[in-house]
Image (spheres, rainbow, N blue to C red):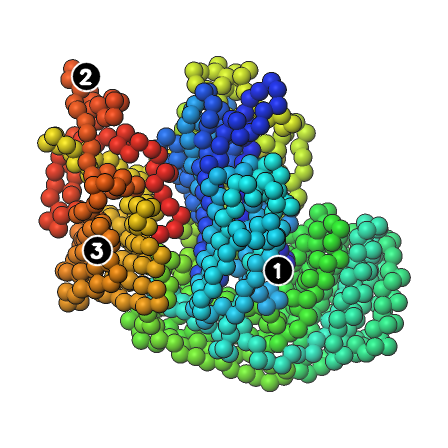
Amino acid sequence: MMDRAALRLILLGVFLISASSQQPVKKKQNVDIYSFYINSTVTSRYATTVITSRVANTVNESQEIQFEVKIPKNAFISKFRMTIEGKIYDGVVKEKQEAQQQYSRAVSRGESAGLIKSVGRTLEDFKTSVTVAAFSKVTFELTYEELLKRRLGKYELLINAQPMQPVADFKIDVHIQEKPGISFLEVKGDLSTDDLANAIKTTRADKDAWVTFYPTRDQQTKCKSCGENGLNGDLLITYDVERSNHTGEVMVSNGYFVHYFAPSNVPRIPKNVVFIIDRSGSMNGRKIHQTRLALLKILGDLDEDDHFGLITFDSEVKTWKNELLKATEGNLETAKSFVKEISDRGATDINAAVLAGVDMINRHPREGTASILILLTDGDPTSGETNIERIMANVKEAIGLKFPLYCLGFGYDVNFDFLTKMSLENGGVARRIYEDSDADLQLQGFYEEVAVPLLTDIQLKYTGGTNLTKTSFSLYFNGSEIVVSGQITDNSVESFTTEVTAVSKGNNVTYQETVMAKDPSDVPPENEDFMPRLWAYLTVKQILERQVLLKGQEKEDEKEEALKLSLKYQFVTSLTSMVVTKPQEDEVEVADKPKEGGEEPRPVPGYSHFSPHRPGLHGRPGRPGRPGKHSRRRLPGLPMRFSTPGPPPGYPAIHVLLVPRVGSNRFLLPAAGQSKPLCFDVPAPQKLRLLQDSASEFSMNGQFMTRQQGFIQIAFHYKTNHHLTINTRSIRYQDGQNQVEFLWDQEPTQHNTEGVSLILRRNEMDVTMGNIHVVILLHKKNGEVFLWPAVRQQPKDVSLRGILGKAEALYEEVRGSQTPTLKIMDQEVKASLEDVTDYTLPSTPVIRCWLVPFQAVMQGDISDFTVTQL
């Protein structure tokens, strides 16, 4: 968890498209990724990222289109959706055993399973595919969530783009919202070059920052890190927040709180650090060389009031000196000479080596200091005491929670579960050091995180708080941050008190603060649910980390709690799976989260890293419009892919049930010359383009949620400086630097400026912008409160876009058909008579309408009418 790159939020969009040809054919002749958006919103360090790709099959035959995207290992997938020909398929998160049964049934029918595998140090690879009919479109949408960790004084957001072809509509939007203010923000990376300088725009306000990256199609092929396959690089966004309050930042909202504790005006504590270095035979070659390089650099960074010791071990334990020595220039030079002579030999006696390190610290106590043990090893214990349980018991008894033990596991042969458990039992963490050319930098990077201790024995208390995340920490290091979240027992309280006690350089210190629980939040309405989601994310993460330490009923109780939260918030964790049922004969994919710290995926004989074929395999004949067994095509240079009965044993897989969404909102469209209007359903949740007129720079977008009627928020934009946001509580209008706010229950009022007229009546907001007149109605029905727009006037000589862009429809009933059929735009479609509530009127009458498919009315997919942000 403390890996340097593990704090980076990594978004990598990759699309591998299976297309056919006897001769090499460019991908863009077969498919067109006509829109690719990455939208990341960071609200108080909690990042929610949505990757949306819209792809068109441009040939006159069905073909399989594959979606592949890489996400951070620390993130939880919370949503996956495919939209195909107007029909939405959503992944459903289930308890792992239930999902596995569904997956096993699919495998027994000869179907395939989707995989999410670990790739490298910080990424997981989500991959799926779907067969798309000739000249049809598919939209993929993946959402994941992560709490950014502060490391060395900053948060990092890494966005990597590799779409595999130039994209006409390519956008990356990042919005960072931090209540205490943003102290600095930088944009670097491969894509932050002279070639793409005008595609990157950074906007700063006191509490907000926006970074956009809109490269043209031409720029995507001509920048230094680009080629004929488009962009290939990253944007690295680093930032930190203002820290004027020494007690940290406390936010309270919707019955939850989060406390960010990162004091900076604290003197550093001198440290006692002992490095315990494995020099067994398996460390030979580059491992031992890189360890020497890292130690030489680390020794050079010790402060003079630090004390340190060096221990090397194989089957024997060797100490540089028998006691801790002060980091004077002379002692450091002698220590560096010792380090240069470290060579590999022998077996691995971890038990004796760690106990020797504990003894060295215990024999030289220094008041007002912080002690740290750092173990580096690349293998299992093979000498001396080799029973892992006894080693852990010995170490735990010797340390007695007096100081932390950090375990660094070098490479993939190491027993990382053992190191993780031993670290957690002794107040530290385990880190994998990847066997690569920069292993010495990884070691140095870890040391930098623990180089400057500021506080010890930190205890956080919250009067009126319950269901708290971890509140006890052995050490706080400069540049890091302690985050605690919980629920408030009494929502009616006016204030909320936090108290932090700790030891600072031998002295007891207390930080206390009282915040107003009823303060209005600076968080926009669409992000208001981030607080409970942050609490759930942190709770689940910490429970899963503690599982290795717990036993019996306590272990089962905590596991049950983590499972309940994972299901409630639809997180794909190690306890849950996301099941995806795809359109072709209900084929099932299951995605499981790879095990943290698990083995690096290695190629399995006879198993391809590309996802297996879906249709036309397993001896089933091909069908019209779908390639059969012998008609499957591939891109030149890509291996053919073969189906297997599920993933091979031990291969890390992420489990994903896709089913058509039930929740929807029904829209009415009057029909010229007909007594009954048309109606159509739009599935929830969605962010929709409701009205747009590019000529007058007007747009109206709306958002509605699952299992809720109507809209929760509607936003207007007019010209460049008029912005109106309406939610179920208030109306906020901004005109350049000026802002006014209305409440729904206040007295009727009116506001006019520069072609904009706003009139607030009881449960109605009358909006006129230019020559477009819309009324937003506030409905309170069946215990729900929601919004609904009604277009009262639109210019006759302008063709408006959006869900509400059509003023009326034309249709005629087809006589003689066995089932009700309407002819719309020269196309015959099935219809049914349904009752619908007309929310465009305050009286909400119920009327009869012809229910028809969305596409028949709107002449496009729902994905053509969605937006990434309001």
Total tally of numbered discs in the picture: 3
Compared with 72, 659 (above or below) is: above
Q: Which residue carries the number 1 mark?
A: 2
Observer-nearest of 756 and 654: 756
Percent across and percent down for residue 472 are 53, 70
Observer-nearest of 568 and 729: 729
Mark 2 near mark 1, Cβ–Cβ under 8 Å?
no
Percent across and percent down for residue 21 are 57, 20
| Residue 767 image label | 3
**Residue at screen point 85% across, 64% down:** 339
Q: Which residue carries the number 2 mark?
A: 818
* Spatial separation of the CA atoms under disc 2 and disc 3: 46 Å
Is residue 632 left or right of 601 when viewed as pictured?
left
Identify which amino acid the numbered label 2 is placed on. Answer: Gln
Is residue 239 left or right of 404 when viewed as pictured?
left
Observer-nearest of 131 and 169: 169
Percent across and percent down for residue 170 are 49, 43
Question: Mark 2 vs mark 3: which is more N-terminal?
Answer: 3
Compared with 204, 833 (above or below) is: above
Question: Mark 2 vs mark 1: which is more N-terminal?
Answer: 1
SS of the residue under disc 2: loop
SS of the residue under disc 1: loop
> Residue 423 sits in which quadrant?
bottom right
